[in-house]
Image (tube, helix red, strand yellow):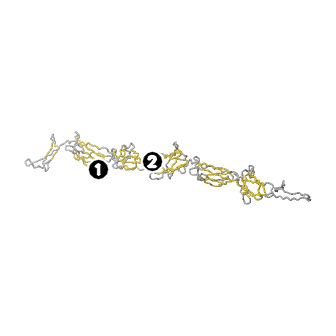
């Protein structure tokens, strides 16, 4: 019976039988054959390549030469796994499950079980920590948590070199795999409309042995500023208006900024904080109505476009007129002249009177055509016969100035009153000539039963009143009465012309034959006064008269 076999040999299982017989002279020779061992054992030790720390939980398959799995083992807490009774042959140790954070062996570990192996075959298998990592970005709205698609990021290494570029998907995610160990920056290169672009990059680090995807939640704030572009235009023509000044006021009425429209009628206000505002027209253009109501608008979070405000201005549809009334010749201002302002249909719109400066102002006349009609002129001045036409147009920027000249009256009237010098009794039937300064007869008049004769519309100038036929019993005026018609005469020139009764008489003698009554010619008579003095001597004519 084999109690102990040599190293590397199988111990005999069956005893060797032999017999000792009587009379044996020679020693009995026994040849005992032992087979070398045909099984072997393997012990795997799994360690971290760098730290040599034992790694528990790594699963290996032992495969024979044909790739058939002979057994499967898992390393224990000491990083060991033992495989016993492996038949002589060639094997491969294949890592089936590596530890998180470690690279899985890509190449199997080959070993061989040889006959007569007396020791356990020890295999030390080293695993490297992973030197790559992955990052998953989740892009969300800071306030609502809404996932944001379409945000583009660059992944830059420590030196600022772009490693890769990614864009978030519809779930707001972007994954970057196989980043080598190192420090990185996540730089937002394209934000979404309405969102603030990240001002600072997001730093992260890929470390050896990372077992999970590094999750980075990146929040974006909605833009809290906005811009407004004002376009100022004429309401009717849509022509752009340059030079209109606006104030931007906040809700409290505080002026935030002041802008003026440019040659394209535009004014832009940038970086207005979120809130409610009013656009107040501070200075309008001449000829345009100033906006009476402010334009309200609101800057909201996340505004992606410039807020466009089209502001229309109407041309002024009222106008003013200032009349200046002057003397045509002297240009002296004339107070107290009354005018009516009439519209196109002749309707009286208003009535005005010139002041001490000769002026009368009519304000707030609506657009349209008008006539200025002189209703009351000044004494001594001709009243305007033709109205003065004018028009109030849209967009009038200045008071329409109308200078109206009045001519002084250049005609005058004379009223002659003929009376008896003593009794002042009026004398009808006296004939006068009105002669100009050259003696030319202008007109001839006869006093009426009231003793009056009126000469109207005498032009300015010097005249003489010449009595051409007096009344019987009255002395005829020997000297003409001079008078003058001057410009601006407001009253008739009145003359009272007195006539004296004659203080002598006339005698007519008629000398005839007593019987035949025939006139007697050449009869001489003396006329003597009461004292016998001859006053006159006369001779009858062929008609017997003297």
State the mark number for residue 84.
none
Q: CA distance from mark 2 to mark 1?
A: 66 Å
Residue 95 position, x and y percent, is: 72, 55
- Residue farthest front in this picture: 22
**x and y, in percent, of residue 388 in the image:** 36, 49
Circle 1 is placed at which residue position?
A: 438
> Is residue 536 or residue 131 the one in the foreground?
131
Q: Earlier in the sequence, mark 2 or mark 1?
A: 2
Q: Secondary structure at mark 2?
A: loop
| Residue 51 seen in this snapshot | no
Q: How many marks?
A: 2
Q: Does the rendering let one see residue 462?
A: yes
Q: Nearer the viewer, residue 546 or 201?
A: 201
> Helix, strand or loop at disc 1?
loop
Q: Is residue 31 left or right of residue 460?
A: right
Residue 71, placed above or below residue 511: below
Whole-percent x and y of residue 296? 49, 46
Q: With 276 as the anchor, is 538 left or right in this view?
A: left
Please name whichever residue, 385 or 9, is drawn nearer the observer in this view of the structure: 9
Mark 1 closeness class: few <14, some 14–19, many ≥20 residues within 10 Å: few
Compared across the picture, whether 39 is left or right of 189 comes to right
Q: Residue furthest top?
A: 423
Q: Give the percent coordinates (x, y) of residue 404.
A: 37, 48
User: Of discs 2 and 1, which sits in the foreground?
Assistant: 2
**CB within 8 Å, label 2 to label 1:** no
Mark 2 sits on what residue? 289
The residue lying furthest to the left in this view is: 515
Mark 2 neighbour density, 10 Å: few (under 14) some (14–19) many (20 or more): some
Vertically, is 267 above or below 68? above
Query: Which quadrant is the N terminus positioned in?
Result: bottom right
């Amino acid at each position: 019976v084999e109690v102990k076999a040599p190293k590397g040999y199988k111990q005999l299982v069956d005893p060797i039988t032999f017999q000792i017989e009587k009379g044996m002279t020679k020693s009995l020779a026994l040849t005992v054959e032992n087979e070398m061992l045909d099984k072997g054992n393997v012990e795997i030790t799994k360690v971290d390549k760098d730290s040599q720390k034992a790694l528990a939980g790594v699963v290996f398959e032992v495969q024979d030469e044909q790739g058939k799995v002979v057994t499967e083992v898992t390393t224990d807490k000491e990083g060991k796994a033992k495989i016993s009774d492996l038949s002589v042959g060639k094997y491969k140790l294949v890592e089936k499950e590596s530890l998180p954070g470690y690279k899985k062996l890509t190449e199997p570990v080959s070993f061989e079980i040889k006959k007569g192996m007396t020791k356990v075959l020890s295999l030390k298998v080293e695993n490297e920590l992973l030197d790559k990592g992955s990052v998953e970005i989740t892009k969300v709205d800071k306030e609502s948590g809404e996932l944001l698609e379409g945000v583009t990021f660059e992944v830059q290494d420590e030196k600022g070199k772009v490693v890769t570029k990614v864009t978030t998907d519809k779930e707001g995610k972007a994954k970057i795999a196989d980043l080598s160990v190192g420090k990185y920056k996540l730089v937002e290169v394209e934000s979404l409309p309405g969102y603030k672009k990240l001002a600072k990059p997001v730093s992260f680090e890929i470390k050896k042995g990372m077992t999970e995807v590094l999750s980075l939640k990146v929040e974006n704030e909605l833009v809290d500023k906005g811009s407004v572009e004002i376009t100022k235009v004429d309401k009717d023509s849509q022509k752009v208006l340059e030079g209109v000044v606006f104030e931007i006021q906040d809700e409290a009425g505080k002026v935030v900024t002041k802008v003026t429209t440019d040659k394209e009628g535009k004014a832009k206000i940038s970086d207005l904080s979120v809130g409610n505002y009013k656009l107040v027209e501070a200075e309008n253009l001449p000829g345009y109505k100033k906006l009476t109501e402010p334009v309200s608008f609101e800057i909201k979070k996340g505004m992606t476009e410039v807020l466009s405000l089209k502001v229309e201005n109407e041309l002024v549809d009222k106008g003013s007129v200032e009349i200046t009334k002057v003397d045509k010749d002297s240009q002296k201002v004339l107070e107290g002249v009354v005018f009516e302002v009439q519209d196109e249909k002749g309707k009286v719109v208003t009535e005005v009177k010139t002041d001490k400066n000769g002026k009368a102002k009519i304000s707030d006349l609506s657009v349209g055509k008008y006539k200025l009609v002189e209703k009351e002129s000044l004494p001594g001045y001709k009243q305007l016969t033709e109205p003065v036409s004018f028009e109030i147009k849209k967009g009038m920027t200045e008071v329409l100035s109308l200078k109206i000249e009045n001519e002084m009256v250049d005609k005058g009237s004379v009223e002659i009153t003929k009376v008896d010098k003593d009794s002042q009794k009026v004398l009808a039937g006296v004939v006068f000539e009105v002669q100009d300064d050259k003696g030319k007869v202008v007109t001839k008049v006869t006093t009426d039963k009231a003793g009056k004769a009126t000469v109207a519309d005498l032009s300015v100038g010097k005249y003489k009143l010449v009595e051409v036929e007096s009344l019987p019993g009255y002395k005829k005026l020997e000297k003409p009465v001079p008078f003058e018609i001057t410009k601006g005469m407001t009253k008739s020139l009145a003359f009272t012309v007195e006539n004296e009764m004659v203080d002598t008489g006339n005698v007519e003698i008629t000398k005839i034959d007593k019987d035949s009554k025939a006139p007697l010619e050449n009869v001489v008579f003396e006329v003597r006064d009461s004292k016998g003095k001859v006053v006159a001597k006369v001779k009858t004519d062929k008609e017997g008269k003297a």
